[in-house]
Image: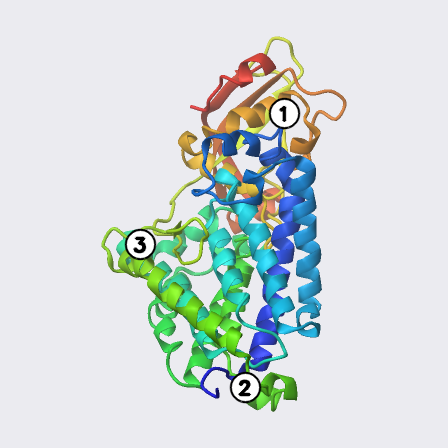
Amino acid sequence: MDWFTAPGYWLARLVFQRALAGVYLVAFIGAALQFRALIGAHGMLPVPRYVRYVPFRRAPSLFQLHYSDRLFAGCAWAGAALAAALAAGAGDEVPLAAAMAMWAALWLLYLSIVNVGQTWYSFGWESLLLEVGFLAVFLGNARAGPPVLVLWLLRWVLFRVEFGAGLIKMRGDPCWRKLTCLYFHHETQPMAGPLSWFFHHLPKPLHRVECAANHVTQLVVPVLLFTPQPVASYAAGAVIATQLWLVLSGNFAWLNWLTITLAVSAVDFTGLAGPPPAAASQEAPLWFVVLVCAVTALVLFLSRHPVLNMVSRRQVMNRSFDALHLVNTYGAFGSVGRVRMEVAVEGTADRVPREDGAWKEYGFKGKPGEPGRLPRQFAPYHLRLDWLMWFAAISPGYARDWFGPFVERLLAGDRDTLRLLRHNPFPDAPPVHVRALLYRYRFTTWRELRETGDWWHRTLVREYLPPTRLAEARLSEPE
C-alpha cells in the first residue's frame, strides 16, 4: 500500500513526536504541582463538587468515576513519566500497537484532567493539545512509515489554528485592519515576558510591519501548507519563525511550542535526513490502515463545525464542539486592550483595617506586581492562577467563582495556595484582613527606566475587594 505511508517523513514524525511528548510533560507537571489549590478536594473549585452536577457525557473523565487528591496526583505524575519516556524514544522501541496504547494513555489522562479542570483549564491550548494528541495515537512508530492521512490531518489542525486566528482578527478589533494593534499588545498581553518591554518600545513603523506580517502568516501562509513540496515546507518554516517571535515577546504557555510542533510535521526533511530506516519502509498492517481511514473519516465529519464557525460572521474563538475535544476551533486576540489593569492583593495583621494601615502585598510569580521587577519567562509552563488574575482585572465577572475562595485560603494561610505565589508577606501567621486594589499599569519609558529602575508604572484606580475577614470571605465578591 504505497499510497498509505510517506516514509520520507520519518524524521518529521520523529521530531514531532518527541516535541509533542515534551509538551505533554510540561502540561502534566503543571497539573501535578498546581491542582491541589485550584481543583483539589479542598481547592478553590473542587472536582468532587463539580462532578456532582456535571454528568459524564458532558465531561468524560476518569475522575467522574472516583476522585481523590492522591488519585489525581498519581495520574498526573504517571502522565509525566509516560510523556518523558515517549520523549526519550520509548515509543519506537515497542510494537506498533503498544506505541499507540502509550499515546492513547497520555491522551486519556490529560482529557480526564481538562474535563474536570473548569475555568482553570478553559484555554484554547488545552483543546489543541488534546486534538493533536489524539491524532498522534495514529501516527505510528518506527515500525511503519508515517501515514499520509494523519500527516494531512495535522496540517488541517495547523491551518485551523492559524487561519482561524487570522479571521478573528480581521473581523474583530479595527486596530488589526489599521495595523496598530501592536502599539498596545506587548504591554497589555496576559503575561509579559522579559523582552516584552523592549518589544513594546520598538518604533511604530516596525509594529505596523509586525501586524502586516501576522496577517500574511495567518491568512495566506496556511493555504500553502496544502501545496506540493518544497512550498509546504517553506510555509511551515514561516509559521515556525512567527511562533518563535511570539515566544520571545510574551508568555503563552505551550501554545507557541505546540504550534511549532505541528508545523514540523509538514516539513519535508528528505534532503537533510537521507533515506528512511528499513523498518519505516515496511508495509503497514491492514488493521492499522483500516483504523487510520476510520479516524480520518471521523475527523472530516466533525470538521463541519469549525468550518461553519470560520465562515460565520459571528465566529467564536477557542471552542470545543464535542466532549472529547477531537476537532475544535481556535483563535486569539480578536480584540486588543489599550489599557492594562492589574489586581493587587494585600493583607494586614491589623485588627481594625485602615486605608493607611500596614498593608503588605502578595507577590505573584508571573503577573506584574512590584514596578521594579522585570517580567520573567515561564512559558511553556502555564501559571494558571496568574493568567486568571489577568482576566479578573478585565472584569470581576471572570473571577466570581474563584476569587472569594482564593481570598479565603489566603486568610487561612493555606499552604497549597501559597505555593502558587512567589512571595508570602505573612510567613509566620496569616493576615487578619485581605483586600484587593485595582491598578492601571503601563510600561515605563526609557527615561523613567534610567531614573527609577522600574519596568512598570502603576496608578491606583479603585478598590477591587474591600478589607475582608475569614468569616466574610465565603460571601465576598469583587466589585
Which of the two discs, 2 and 3, sits closer to the camera? Answer: 2
Q: Is tag 1's residue or tag 3's residue first in the polypeptide sequence? A: 3
Residue under label 2, please give it. 8
Identify the mark at residue 410; answer none if there is no mark: 1
Residue 446 lies, with reference to residue 17, above or below; the image says above
Judge whether residue 301 can be spotted in this image.
yes
Q: Along the polypeptide, which appears first: circle 2 or circle 3?
A: 2
The amino acid pointed to by label 3 is Cys
How far separated are the C-alphas under marks 2 and 3?
A: 43 Å
The answer to which of 461 and 32 lies nearer the viewer is 32
> Which secondary structure, mark 2?
helix
Question: Residue 349, position in %: x, y?
Answer: 67, 16
Does 286 sit above or below residue 374? below
Q: Where is residue 363 in the image (x, y as percent from the top left)?
A: 63, 35
Asked which secondary structure carries label 3, the reply is helix
Which of the two labelled residues, at mark 2 and mark 1, occupies the earlier sequence position?
2
Q: Marks 2/1: CA distance?
A: 56 Å
Of 116 and 2, the residue lying toward us = 2
Any part of residue 245 in sight: no
Hey, what amino acid is under mark 1? Leu
- Judged left or right of residue 415, residue 287 is left
